[in-house]
Image (spheres, rainbow, N blue to C red):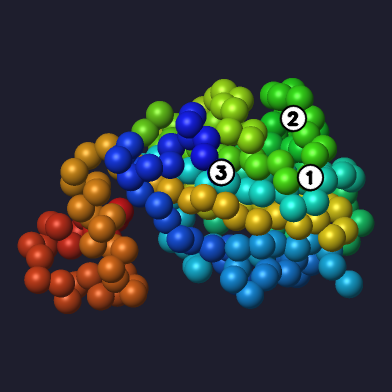
Amino acid sequence: MQYPCLPQSVSGGYVEECWEWDINAKSPAVQLSPCRRAVYFHIDPILQSEGFIHGEHFWEVNFLEPPYGTSVMVGAGTKQALLHLGNYQFINMLGMDSESWGLSYKGTIWHGGQSRQYTEPFYEKATIIAVDLNLYDGTIAFYKNGHNLGVAFTGLNKVGVPLYPIVSSTTAETELQLGMRSCRFMSLQEQCLYTVLQHLVDKVHIDSLPLPGFIRGQLKEF
């Protein structure tokens, strides 16, 4: 499915990514599919990511079933964002504090415990919600089925720590699946650093690279 208004092509400066949901960073009420792209909530959920601190990052979340219940959310957060609150706490977890930013299927956006109406609710099966995290401008914008809903949050470039994609749900048997994932870097320097890191198994190997010391230092910080 092609969305002309979304950043999809390498020629447009975006590079496709292949990260998955992190099996070690999830609520115990969540299960992942074997491919780690689909996440299942309350059934009786990124290959491990370094988080985003530079560049512009774009990812899609496909609602495999119609959302319902108190809360089903898509967004981003820091490593300190809450991932689980225990049973029978039906709240909008993304955005309940200053560590995360989230969009509810009811059309509200949440951060710092505050909410506002951002768009119309979406109840349909196969709805695709995309997140555009722009760390140059410090903004998060959401897309619904290819339509840009506008800037939802600002100031993300001042957070100072890596940000991670997050989804949450209070509803039994919620099914969400990752779609397209891509990133874009404005400068040649950032593109080069990113390319080198993509070929490393772990950052601990940076010091063994035949590169000047200041470049190795930039790789560690990137």
4 versus 63 height, above or below: above
**Judging from the image, what secondary structure is the residue with disc 2 in?**
strand
Q: Which residue is mark 2?
A: 108
187 versus 151 height, above or below: below
Mark 1–mark 2 distance (CA, rounded to whole Å): 19 Å
Q: Residue at x 10, y 65 (%)?
A: 211
Eye-nearest disc, 3 or 2 = 3
Is residue 221 visible to the viewer in this orientation of the structure? Answer: yes
Q: Residue at x 75, y 63 (%)?
A: 40
Residues packed near mark 1 inside 10 Å, few (<14), some (14 to 19) or many (20 plus): few
80 versus 198 height, above or below: above
Q: Nearer the viewer, residue 69 or 37?
A: 37
Task: Point out residue 23 in the picture as x, y percentages from the top left corner.
Answer: 61, 71
Task: Point out residue 46 in the picture as x, y percentages from the top left corner.
Answer: 54, 63
Decide if residue 205 is on the left or right side of residue 28: left
Decide if residue 157 is on the left or right side of residue 102: left
Task: Point out residue 36 in the picture as x, y percentages from the top left corner.
Answer: 60, 68
**Judging from the image, what secondary structure is the residue with disc 3 in?**
loop
Decide if residue 59 is on the left or right side of residue 108: left
Q: Which residue is mark 3?
A: 1
Q: Earlier in the sequence, mark 1 or mark 2?
A: 2
Query: How many numbered marks does the figure carry?
Result: 3
Q: Check residue 125 in the rendering and tell me which mark sits there, or answer none.
A: 1
**Judging from the image, what secondary structure is the residue with disc 1 in?**
loop
Mark 3–mark 2 distance (CA, rounded to whole Å): 27 Å
Q: Residue at x 18, y 62 (%)?
A: 216
